[in-house]
Structures are given as C-alpha cells and as structure tokens.
Image (tube, rainbow, N blue to C red):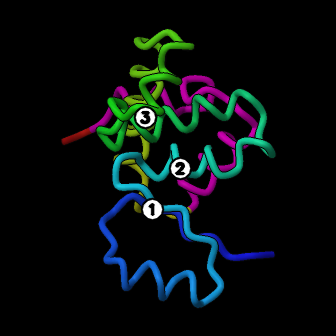
Amino acid sequence: MPVAYIDHHYLTDEAKKEIVKAGVDLHHDINDCSAMLTYATYKGKLPSEARLLALYGAVTDYMDGSASASRMMETFDRQFVLLESTILSYALAKNGRDLSYPDMLVKELATMKAPHSIDEVGKEALSRQR
C-alpha cells in the first residue's frame, strides 16, 4: 500500500520534491484543510456521508471558508455542521489525553455516526471544564 502525505501546512518546494522522490503520494494545498484534502483524495472509496467528516475538520480547523468546503457546505444545513463540529471538538478537547478516547471517536465516526449520537460525546462536550 502506498504511503500518502496529506497536509495543508506550508512546505518548501524542496521538501515537496524530497517527499515525492521518496515515493510518497503527496496531497498538499495550503488553501484547504487536511480533512478536505483527505476526503478529496479518497472520496471514491468513501460513502457520501464522509463529506460531513471533512466539513467537521474544516470547521474545527477554521478553514470552512475555503472554496471546496464552502461548496460542500451548501449541500448541508450549516448550523447542523457547526453544532456537530463543536460538540466533537469540545468532547475531544476534554478527553483527548486519554488515547482510548480519540480511538473510540475514530471508530464511531468511521461508521458515519454523527458526533451527537456517539455515547456520551454530547454530554462530555456540554460539561467541558475550562
């Protein structure tokens, strides 16, 4: 299986060349978040509901104004996407140090569950301590 490098942070042209030279499949664009880039890379292998996962990433990475995220957002209720993204982000911020928690979230999100429907995620988000 080929290795893919998907990122939106700045890379020099030299770094990009080295990544490709190493045989890595590079997907890079500073104008989009990694979640959107990942969706674009694998969308042919993903269910259509995976578009929401990409949007959750775009919202929490403050990149939902990108061209691709904006177009995708038009097909959903924006308030729903913002709410689900916030619930997910808050729950992860509260419990992310326990490595089993992000693992659980990934497994649940991979089944295309909405964050609010994952056991305790909504409750955890609402009880977030600062």
Amino acid carrying label 3: it is Glu
Instruction: Identify residue for label 1.
Output: 7
Q: In what element is the residue under mark 2? A: helix
What amino acid does circle 1 point to?
Answer: Asp
Residue at 67%, 76% in the rendered image: 3
Q: Is residue 58 above or below residue 101?
A: above
The residue that mark 2 highlights is 37
Depth order, front residue of 79/41: 41
The image quadrant that residue 79 belongs to is top left
1 and 2 marks in contact (CB < 8 Å): yes
Classed neighbour count for the residue bearing mark 1: other residues with Cα under 10 Å, few (<14), some (14–19), many (≥20): some
Q: Residue at x 31, y 77 (%)?
A: 12
User: Label 1 vs label 3: CA separation?
Assistant: 29 Å
Question: Are discs 2 and 3 less than 8 Å apart at CB?
Answer: no
Image point 62% across, 24% down: which residue?
117
Number of residue marks: 3
Magenta span includes 101 = yes
Label 1, label 2: how far apart the Cα atoms are: 7 Å
Where does residue 85 sit, x and y in percent of width and height?
43, 30
Residue type for callout 2: Leu
Query: Badge 2, how many Cα within 10 Å: few under 14, some, many 20+?
Result: many
Dot in front, 1 or 3: 1
